[in-house]
Image (spheres, rainbow, N blue to C red):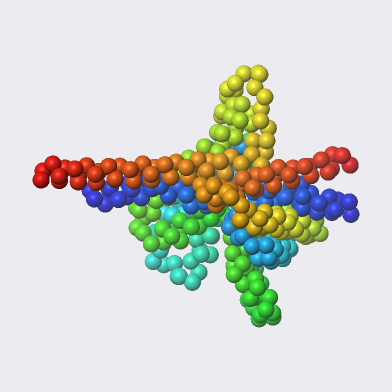
Amino acid sequence: MATDVTAYEEMIKGLWRDNPVFVQVLGMCPMLAVTNSAINAVVMGLATFFVLVGSSFLVSSFKQWIPKQVRISLYIIIIATFVTVVDYSLLALVPAIHKELGAFIPLIVANCMILGRQEAFASKHTIKYAVMDAVGMSGGFMIALLALGSVREILGVGALFGVDLFGPHFEPWVIMILPPGGFLTLGLLLLFFNWFSERRKQFLAKVAQADQNASIAGVKDNG
Amino acid sequence: MDDLLWIFISTLLVNNFVLAYFLGLCPFLGVSGQLDTSFRLGLATTFVLVVTALCAWILNTYVLIYAPYLRLISFIVVIASVVQFIEMSIKKLSPSLFKSLGIFLPLITTNCAILGLAIFATNRGYGLLEGLVFALGAGGGFTLAMVLMAGIRQETEIMDVPALIRGTAFNLIIAGILSMAFMGFAGLFSAA
């Protein structure tokens, strides 16, 4: 049972504590370029999920046969293979969204988060842990994409997933779906994330302090 | 000729690779602390971009018409080996240049601007000359953005910025404002 608990932890850590976007600041290019609507963000998230889980699985299964000197090139070739699969599948399944995402689907190859996970995690752990880690990391990436995409679509178009939210009198804040909006929104989200972590740290410190005081008081009472 | 000029100006300013297409953000946010290192990194990237444009054109014309599904894999492999090759030859030919670029050259392989350039040039069906001009414009735009960002960051270093904002969040907000300023160039062509 103990192994299951740690595998679960490997998955959970990617969602919030080691979130690839908010904490490690990786994979910025696709992050900003495709998040002008929530649906694009979801498709991008799913594509990254497939590529990351697939290549983590393959890298960790083949890890004892991969020579150390050429490992980076081999990881990139494995990743590029999965990205090609995703590219052609999206073209067949959702041609409209594939057209909108355009060159950014092939650019998943250059997402440093994916290569980073292979180098830092999948090449050193067993298949089970590598897959769990990949699921968590791409889940965290998806959360970040969705947060950014929803904020930008709500403010820039007044809709979410194409559903109109505010009625005809809403004046759309067009800059939010243009490139500057991406930079500004992500900057403010990071700021919010920092503020939240800081608050949490202070809160935990306060709790620890209170516990200590209580135990000291308890000792005194007993004495 | 007009066409080539248009491609150059448009990738340099209007469709700036960093500020409008979000390509090459890692070095843009990571290495832009010092003015002269970011300028040198910009020049090195421009060089690699031009070489990549040449390779992409050769691959597209002679190899990939037979196997289009291998495009992504072959681009990535070619870019990685070209960067490696350039690194080795610079090391041999000009050790002083290698010393000033050294750290950045291998980093350039993972710069998505390089792969992005090859893919964009293919999607738009550029020929050899157009591709080279496109690469020059993209490299110039990247250098321009890097230098502007480094200058602003050096200025804000001594300012009284709250500790909570410092770091990536602050850089992203600066980039947002820069990107907004660059949107002004979009009027350059509709007016003419």
Residue at coordinates 62% horizontally, 68% vertically from top-left?
A: B105
Horizontal and vertical percent position of residue A214: 22, 42
Left or right, residue A54 beside residue A31: left
Residue at position x 68%, y 75% in the image: B97
Q: Is residue B7 left or right of residue B51?
A: right
Residue drawn at point x = 66 percent, y = 18 percent: A169
Q: Quadrant of residue B75?
A: bottom right
Q: Residue B135: x, y in percent?
A: 74, 58
The single residue placed furthest to the left in the displayed view is A223
Q: Nearer the viewer, residue B95 or A128?
A: B95
Nearest the viewer among B187 and A217 is A217
Residue A66 visible in the snapshot: yes
Left or right position of A130 against A110: left
Q: Can residue A132 be seen in the rendering of this structure?
A: no
Q: Nearer the viewer, residue A20 or A75?
A: A20
- The percent position of residue B89, horizontal first and vertical second, equals 66, 77
Residue B173's spot in the image, x, y percent? 61, 45
